[in-house]
Image (cartoon, grey):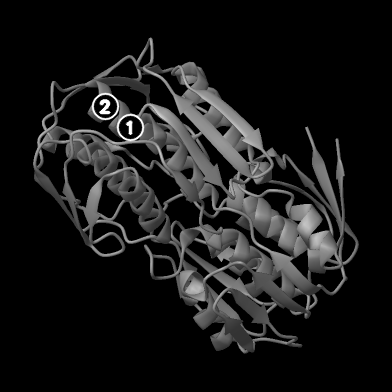
Amino acid sequence: MDRMVIEGGHQLNGHVDVGGAKNSALKLLFASLLAEGKHTFHNVPNLADVGSAAVLLNSLGCETHRSGTTFTVNVKKPQSFEAHYDLVRKMRASILCLGPLLAKYGEAVVSLPGGCAIGTRPIDLHLEGMKALGATITLEEGYVKARAKKLKGANFLFETSTVGGTENVMMAATLAEGITVLENAAKEPEIVDLAEYLNKMGAKIKGHGTSVITIEGVEKLKPAEHTVMSDRIEAGTLLIAGAMTGGEVTVNRIHPAHIEALIVKLKEAGFKISQTDLSVTVHRQIGWRAVDITTNPYPLFPTDIQAQFMALMTIAEGTSVITETVFENRFMHVQELCRLGADITPKTRVAVVRGKPGGLIAAPVMATDLRASASLVLAGLVAKGATVVNRIYHLDRGYENLEGKLTQLGAKIKRIE
């Protein structure tokens, strides 16, 4: 298993480009199942999760190919409509092949999903949405079995905001008969990116990016070409890295509006932030004050940046209260940050972080999930000595060459196999 060794105390400075968004690329790849033929995607990150998606698509009869950041999927009618446990257990997003298979072929057998152990993340709203469209759903031996001769448009209200549920039902509704209205839909930019690709394929979707999405079903979709949006979580991680080390870092190829909630909190902490249409810069700041955050669905503060922001707060002046409302088990990085000298008191959904400017000291730590991994790397950038982060395969699920980008900015990091 690979480890990462980070020598703390080096200021980060310079410009860095953000790659394609994992949380968009995966959904786009599964959307290809809605239309047979060759789909072409650009700006696709080379990540473990994208590799897992390709293996799953191949198991369903598709032919996938990568050339640089361009990824093609040649979709053919599957011999089997089953997404097997061995493939799905590695990545929660695999459940998003359910809607396309059901809508296109009238049946799907998908294992209950895996992914990071950050909470229960049930898929009941995915299934209720499919039922509203007329599907018959059963759960047998750890698999979701779905059937429908022809999906029918319907009005469906999500009880709580769900990104995956919105995407899954939206994809299924593109080939349903009639009009579907999704209320309390998630508003994330990745949903907008997916809807834009579906519309390129011939779908008729309106309202994406708002809480009410309307889909007029069509008879058939066709393959298309699309460029994946930039990864707002990677952009936020890199900005926090610059902020923590007291440097000046410009993150390119990112829409500032996509990380507005983070920008607001960085400014509240005392950082000067400047931006253009496609870049954000955090300027040098020596000493910053603690601020409170509460994670919530977009456009509020993202749960996927909570761990990284907590790392920033461990060396702030004062005490911050971090409240996690999205996932009930997303403080697993706390005990590892404490191993580095952080002063954090966690409860079930709330963590109190007492800042210790310059107070982190290197130690061996263990990554427990994707974003926790990133928080430990960030803490290692400022800890005195050499921090060893174990089990960084979690990091590779969502960040392409993070150590290379940080090194480009002046960090001292090496990966040990």
User: Residue 59: horizontal and vertical position, in percent?
Assistant: 49, 17
Q: Is 295 on the left or on the right of 417, as rendered?
A: left
Question: Which residue is label 1 attached to?
Answer: 34
Q: Is 109 on the left or on the right of 400, as rendered?
A: left
User: Which mark sits nearer the N-terminus, 2 or 1?
Assistant: 1
Which type of secondary structure does the marked residue at label 2 adopt?
Answer: helix
Which type of secondary structure does the marked residue at label 1 adopt?
Answer: helix
Asked if the residue at tag 1 contacts the one at tag 2, i.e. Cβ–Cβ closer than 8 Å, the answer is yes
Q: Work out which quarter of the rendered image holds the N terminus and state it.
A: top right
User: Would you call the spot at circle 1 few (<14 residues within 10 Å), some (14-19), or many (20 or more)?
Assistant: many
Q: Nearer the viewer, residue 91 or 355?
A: 91
Disc sitting over residue 104 in the figure? 2
216 versus 323 height, above or below: above
400 versus 91 height, above or below: below
User: Residue 19: horizontal and vertical position, in percent?
Assistant: 63, 55
46 versus 264 height, above or below: above
User: Would you call the spot at circle 2 few (<14 residues within 10 Å), some (14-19), or many (20 or more)?
Assistant: many
84 versus 387 height, above or below: above
Write the residue at 57% across / 65% down: 345
User: Residue 94: horizontal and vertical position, in percent?
Assistant: 44, 32
Q: Amino acid at mark 1?
A: Leu
Residue placed furthest toward the top: 79
Q: Nearer the viewer, residue 135 or 18?
A: 18
